[in-house]
């Protein structure tokens, strides 16, 4: 019999950093503290920045690593699709994506494969949460996985019990501090970066032919209160509800009035 603190729910775990990424192991530990019915279906290789892309021009290759653990040669979206439509005998009750190596804040959510996997779960009507562990703000490259591992189980089950409407996914970011130094959980809105952090590094190969690397500088901006950026900068856990409907309702109504009225 499962311990009394566990739930009788089925959890699908996935990510965008790849099957062998340390964050996936952290998320599996979080999931197993919540339930004994945990399935992992993750990309075979890193898919960071894949966003909500599907593999349409190539066949998908599926490989079982061990019981209830699979890898797909494809994107995070492919993984959720394969899990729900092919691998599992019934859909999960909860999709967890991550734990991403690095924050998914503000504009990042439009690029993130971690967010996209949670989006795909949401498309299926399954409650879905994306989780990311911030790092680099303390001047080092060390990822404090223990922060997500410590706070993740209680936060996930609290959010699951709270519930949220269909068409919504939750974006959770853990700050770059030790577990005992973490501030309270804050419900935040998606921020917007007030500076251009994307850098394009131009280099030359051995034949003098140029090539390019995209990257992001890890510099703090000065975001408004209540945003995901501000919460993470100040050491709090950020939870941001995101919705699949990208329609801007106020602008839609304004344009309807103007267009229909001829003004």
Image: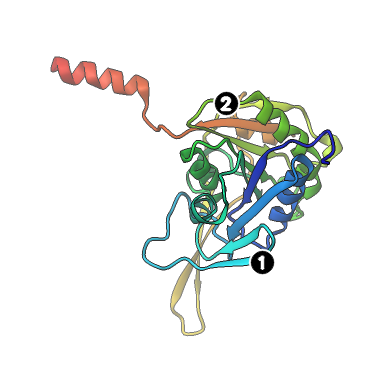
Is 157 in front, or is 188? 157
Q: Is residue 70 visible?
A: yes
Q: Position of residue 161 (x, y in %)?
A: 68, 27
Residue at image point 51% right, 56% down: 86
Q: Which residue is mark 1?
A: 65
Numbered mark located on residue 56 in the image: none
For this orientation, the residue located farthest to the bottom is: 207
Mark 1: few/some/many CA within 10 Å (<14, 14-19, 20+): few
Badge 1 or badge 2: first in the primary sequence: 1
Query: Could you tell me which quadrant the N terminus lies in?
Result: top right
The answer to whether residue 234 is seen in the rendering is no
Is disc 2 surrounded by few (<14), some (14 to 19) or many (20+) residues within 10 Å?
Answer: some
**1 on left or right of 62:** right
What residue is rendered at 50% in x and 41% in y?
Answer: 119
Q: Give the quadrant of the C terminus.
A: top left
Residue 9, percent from left and from top: 68, 38
Relative to residue 87, is residue 239 drawn left or right?
Answer: right
Q: Quadrant of residue 252?
A: top left
Residue 231, given in percent of the width and then of the height, sits at 67, 31
For mark 2, what is the residue? 164
In this picture, is 238 found above or below 208?
above
Of badges 1 and 2, nearer the viewer stands 1
Q: CA distance from mark 1 to mark 2?
A: 33 Å
Question: Which element is circle 2 on?
Answer: loop
């Amino acid at each position: 019999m499962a311990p009394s603190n566990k739930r009788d729910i089925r959890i699908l775990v996935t990510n965008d950093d790849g099957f062998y990424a340390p964050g996936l192991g952290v998320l599996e530990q979080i999931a197993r503290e919540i339930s004994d019915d945990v399935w992992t279906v993750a990309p075979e290789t890193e898919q960071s920045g894949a966003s909500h892309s599907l593999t349409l021009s190539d066949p998908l290759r599926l490989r079982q690593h061990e019981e209830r653990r699979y890898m797909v040669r494809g994107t995070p979206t492919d993984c959720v699709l394969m899990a729900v439509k092919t691998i599992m005998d019934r859909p999960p009750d909860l999709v967890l994506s991550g734990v991403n190596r690095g924050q998914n804040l503000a504009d990042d959510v439009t690029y993130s494969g971690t967010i996209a996997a949670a989006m795909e779960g949401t498309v299926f009507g399954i409650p879905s949460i994306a989780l990311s562990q911030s790092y680099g703000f303390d001047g080092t490259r060390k990822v404090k996985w223990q922060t997500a591992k410590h706070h993740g189980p209680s936060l996930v089950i609290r959010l699951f019990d709270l519930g949220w409407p269909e068409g919504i996914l939750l974006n959770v970011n853990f700050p770059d501090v030790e577990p005992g130094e973490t501030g309270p959980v804050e419900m935040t809105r998606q921020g917007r970066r007030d500076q251009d952090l994307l850098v394009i590094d131009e280099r030359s190969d051995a034949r003098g032919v140029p090539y390019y690397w995209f990257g992001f500088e890890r510099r703090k901006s000065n975001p408004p209160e209540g945003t995901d950026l501000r919460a993470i900068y100040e050491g709090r856990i950020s939870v941001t509800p995101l919705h699949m409907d990208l329609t801007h309702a106020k602008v839609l109504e304004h344009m309807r009035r103007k267009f229909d009225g001829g003004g």
